[in-house]
Image: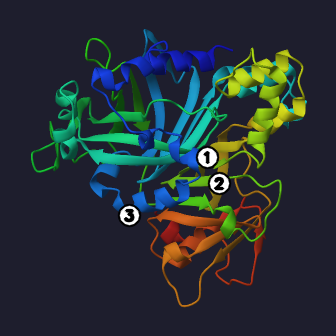
């Protein structure tokens, strides 16, 4: 039960992060840098579309990948792959970050539940102790902002090539109480080839150069990056860092689909999920279907029932308090009804492609196909051959193409194995779909 609490202690230096990341210590920030600012105002669609066009390609290439977190250190504690499965699928713009403690699987595998309703109250509390969030990663070259950097951070700002600021559009832990400091960190790229460590730095012309030249003999060097907190502690050191390893074999295919806002949807169902995202990099993908409409009313109802003496600050605290007081279980399950996971697009001996989930918020979905039983249709507007003008109808919901490295509409239809004909909807389980060689070579 300590997993979420420990993650928080590491990330915040035992609760000191808000104090450390403050204007009085030389780390000023504006409200629009806060991770939930746009989520609260309902402006993520508009803002992300503007930022997509401005994102620097050279900088975003450093973070694009299928990242697995191998180490998380801070506050005198650490966690690693032994304690959790972490998948951060990051395109050049959007991300989905999934983190699942292994203790969850140890407990739940005893009776293999198939829905939230089958979980005991203890298991429901354990189920709340996982995490997934998604949004846009803004990338800025450090040298571009050296003139506005305070003396506290000048040496660090000139040490790293880029600094990233994340803005969330969906967040498992968010129940209406925003994080009071930016989700902002430096990136230190690292490449390891034949036991030699090479790091990328930036020259005076903003060109990324490499120390200890990478051997061309190894076509697949180990690609990592370290994430260092933007603000520092009393010793001018980052108060946390994370080490991420890229598991993607290739980044030839980068695709982001986002569920369209309600005013673009073909219908207005009361039980519709508010947001959704699919991010594909190489043969890895993460997906996230957010909470269902009305979840904010559910939160308020539970808080009102708990009374003034209880002030939960996140999902785990709210679930724990509601279960301890014996409040309406259906309301708790409503908040926990988030569908997200990681998987691989891969081929078997017959060269069939599958979108198989290997890590999921809902553990009973692991081993299944992402599009199992789905109804899919690609809509190509008349007189248009541009990828970004197309959109996907996925189970009667519109999903817009936000980012796509695929330049051919035919290849996109092959990826999802659907018809370009606007009048035809193809129903498929996606479990045994054969792809042509031109797409197979890219995955």
Name the residue nearer the viewer: 100 or 272: 272
Q: Are marks 2 and 1 in contact (CB under 8 Å)?
A: yes
| Mark 3 lies on residue | 53
| Mark 1 lies on residue | 343
Q: What crowding class fits label 2: few (fewer than 14 Cα within 10 Å), some (14-19), or many (20 or more)?
A: many
Q: Single out the residue that lies furthest toward the top.
A: 76
The relative height of residue 44 versus residue 233 in the rendered view (above or below) is below
Percent across and percent down for residue 245 are 41, 35
Disc 2 secondary structure class: strand
Q: How far apart, in angstroms, are the residues tagged by discs 3 and 1? A: 28 Å
The relative height of residue 261 versus residue 312 in the rendered view (above or below) is below
Q: Residue at x 64, y 78 (%)?
A: 379
The relative height of residue 85 versus residue 140 in the rendered view (above or below) is above
User: What label sits on residue 10 in the rendered view?
Assistant: none
Q: Describe residue 361's horizontal placement relative to residue 78 as left or right.
A: right
Percent across and percent down for residue 377 are 70, 73
């Amino acid at each position: 039960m300590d997993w979420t609490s420990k993650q928080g202690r590491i990330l915040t230096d035992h609760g000191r992060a808000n104090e450390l990341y403050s204007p009085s210590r030389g780390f000023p920030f504006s409200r629009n840098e806060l991770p939930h600012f746009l989520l609260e105002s309902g402006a993520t669609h508009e803002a992300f579309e503007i930022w997509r066009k401005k994102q620097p390609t050279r900088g975003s290439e450093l973070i694009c990948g299928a990242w697995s977190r191998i180490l998380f250190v801070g506050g005198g504690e650490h966690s690693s792959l032994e304690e959790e499965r972490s998948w951060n699928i990051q395109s050049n713009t959007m991300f989905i970050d999934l983190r699942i403690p292994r203790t969850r699987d140890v407990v739940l595998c005893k009776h293999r539940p198939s829905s939230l309703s089958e979980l005991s109250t203890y298991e429901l509390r354990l189920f709340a102790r996982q995490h997934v969030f998604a949004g846009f990663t803004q990338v800025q070259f450090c040298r571009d902002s050296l003139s506005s950097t305070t003396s506290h951070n000048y040496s660090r700002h000139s040490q790293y090539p880029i600094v990233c600021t994340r803005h969330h559009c969906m967040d498992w832990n968010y129940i209406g109480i925003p994080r009071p400091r930016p989700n902002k960190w430096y990136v230190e790229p690292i490449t390891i080839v034949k036991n030699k460590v090479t790091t990328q730095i930036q020259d005076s012309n903003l060109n990324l150069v490499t120390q200890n030249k990478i051997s061309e003999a190894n076509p697949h060097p180990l690609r990592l990056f370290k994430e260092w907190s933007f603000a520092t502690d009393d010793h001018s050191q980052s108060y946390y860092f994370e080490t991420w390893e890229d598991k993607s074999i290739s980044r030839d295919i980068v695709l982001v689909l986002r569920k369209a806002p309600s005013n673009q949807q073909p219908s207005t169902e009361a039980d519709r999920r508010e947001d959704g995202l699919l991010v594909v990099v190489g043969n890895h993908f993460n997906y996230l279907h957010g909470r269902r409409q009305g979840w904010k009313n559910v939160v308020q109802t539970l808080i009102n029932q708990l009374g003034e003496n209880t002030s939960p600050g996140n999902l785990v605290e709210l679930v724990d308090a509601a279960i301890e007081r014996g409040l309406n279980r259906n309301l708790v399950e409503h908040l926990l009804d988030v569908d997200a996971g990681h998987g691989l697009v891969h081929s078997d001996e017959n060269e069939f492609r599958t979108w198989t989930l290997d890590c999921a918020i809902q553990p009973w979905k692991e081993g299944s196909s992402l599009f199992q039983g789905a109804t899919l249709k690609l809509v190509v507007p008349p007189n248009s051959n541009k990828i970004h003008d197309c959109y996907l109808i996925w189970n009667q919901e519109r999903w817009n193409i936000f980012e796509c490295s695929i330049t051919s509409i035919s290849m996109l239809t092959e990826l999802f194995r659907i018809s370009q004909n606007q009048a035809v909807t193809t129903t498929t389980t996606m479990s045994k779909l054969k792809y042509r060689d031109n797409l197979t070579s890219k995955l």
